[in-house]
Amino acid sequence: MKKTIRKIIGAVLSAAMTIAPLVPARASASADISAPLSKTLAYLAQTVTAPQFGTGAGEWTVLALSRSAYSVPQGYFSGYYSRVERLVRENSGVLPGSSAKKTEYSRLIIALSAIGRNARDVGGYDLTAWLSSMPKVTQQGINGAVFALIALDAAGGEAPDVAKTSAVTGYDAGAGSANQVTRQKLIDYILDRELGKGTPSAGGFALSGAIADPDLTAMACQALAPYRGGSSNVSAAINRAVSVLSSSQLPNGGFASWESENSESVSQAIMALTALGIDPASDPRFVKSGGSALDALLRFADASGGFAHIAGGGVNGMATDQAALALTAYSRFSQGKASLYDMSDAAPAPEPWVSPFTDVSENDWFYTFVEYAYKNKLMSGVGGGRFDPNGRLTRAMVVTILANSAGADIAGGEAWWSRAREWGMKNGVTDGTNMEAPITREQLVTMLMNYARFSEIDISARADLAKYTDSGTVSFWAVEPVQWAVAVGLITGKSATEIAPTDGATRAEAATILMKYLENIEKQTTK
């Protein structure tokens, strides 16, 4: 029977892949995309381990993982928020790269809203203040207006008074607050940029030129979707845009932008259609001779879970993010949930953990890991309000943690660790030597591998240690445990070229490794 390290809550002690194409089965009218969605979300969670501010730094990943309710490691979203909050404070609310791109604020507001955070108070700054000026928001044209409208809807409430926030933003309110952003102004701005507006050939949107672009047309539909029931003008423009999307769809079900068929265009179309209540897998307008829009997107999927930008290309970060968002949008649509950008069902974030330790601050790399270890009673402080992150754990401490996790009765004994030692030796977790000596990195992962074997978890994974110049210093009995620990992500090198197997494992490292074991290894099924 599989044991579980989650029982450790009662413990006495107070740490480039090969791309191969995958051609999925064709989607049906009641398309079940749970498998490709799960695979893509897992890929994102494994490759974007520390998301932060930035279009390619994990912001869209945060949105996909949160809106799909994917089970991320504890501290994933809170760690992202901490990094964002620190950045906002350090830059007095002015986001890097936002001088002419207010979409930087829009994207961040959407992501924060998705994880239940208040974008109107991040480190003491109201991020929506930078969306209060029409001239500033529309510097990027329709793209800026589209995302500003989505962001304000996600955050809730109106844009702040442009005049009252000018001391922070530096924005000009204009005569009589003429520059003030309102939802209606954003809607009107978008509608006024419909191609061929007022003519029989009206329909669709583009960043420039007179030919409708599927990406911008779909994005405009996503922004306008919440308003189609209250305005005939909005409803009519959306209907024309949907017709444009249908007529521009390729015979194979895909979409092309700038004369190139790509996955991002079909992803945006799927997000738009689901926001409008249209099934992109079965609606006759979006099922062509070669398949549906959903079929077309899945053709860009890679065996790894990532998505390519163009057919036959390698995995692309933006393509993967947008595909994950499209599949999430379709999943929510299929389940009758609120649309992707409708944050009315986003759960409020829990109160952030405040470190009780004077030597653990949110700027420390190990902050999230110590939080996890402390909350789950894996480790506590050493007294005097200190955690002692650089202090050493002994072999006795580790085997006691593991014995308690297995539910062993280890009370009594000559020393406080005697019965734990007996349990560990009996079950092949430790050889029982040098119990009060500080544990090394290779000894720690050896105990964990032994415990994983005892818990009937697959331990067959192995990594090549050749890239580490000190791999030859790994003790002969620890080679396989270290290979396993590197392969499953429990440890990495102390530098790009050194694994440091015989260095003492610090308390911070132990907290990190234990959290990774709990969140990643322990979740595996039994052999």
Image (cartoon, rainbow, N blue to C red):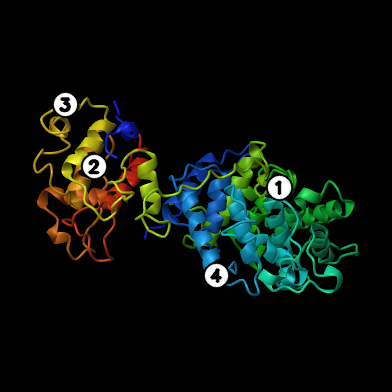
In the picture, the disc for residue 91 is 4
**Numbered disc 2: secondary structure:** helix
Residue type indicated by callout 1: Ala
Mark earlier in primary sequence (2, 1):
1
Name the residue that disc number 2 marks: 448
47 horizontally vs 133: left or right: left
Mark earlier in primary sequence (4, 2):
4
Q: Position of residue 483 (x, y in %)?
A: 22, 51
Label 3 – label 2 distance at C-alpha: 24 Å
Q: Which quadrant: the C terminus? A: top left
Name the residue that disc number 3 marks: 412
Label 2 – label 1 distance at C-alpha: 47 Å
131 horizontally vs 476: left or right: right
Residue type indicated by callout 2: Leu
Label 1 – label 3 distance at C-alpha: 63 Å
Name the residue that disc number 1 marks: 275
Q: Nearer the viewer, mark 4 or mark 1?
A: 4
Label 4 – label 2 distance at C-alpha: 42 Å
Q: Nearer the viewer, mark 3 or mark 2?
A: 3
Q: Is residue 282 above or below residue 493?
A: above
Label 4 – label 3 distance at C-alpha: 56 Å
Give the residue at x 19% y 66%: 469
Q: Nearer the viewer, mark 4 or mark 3?
A: 3
**Numbered disc 1: secondary structure:** helix
Mark earlier in primary sequence (3, 2):
3
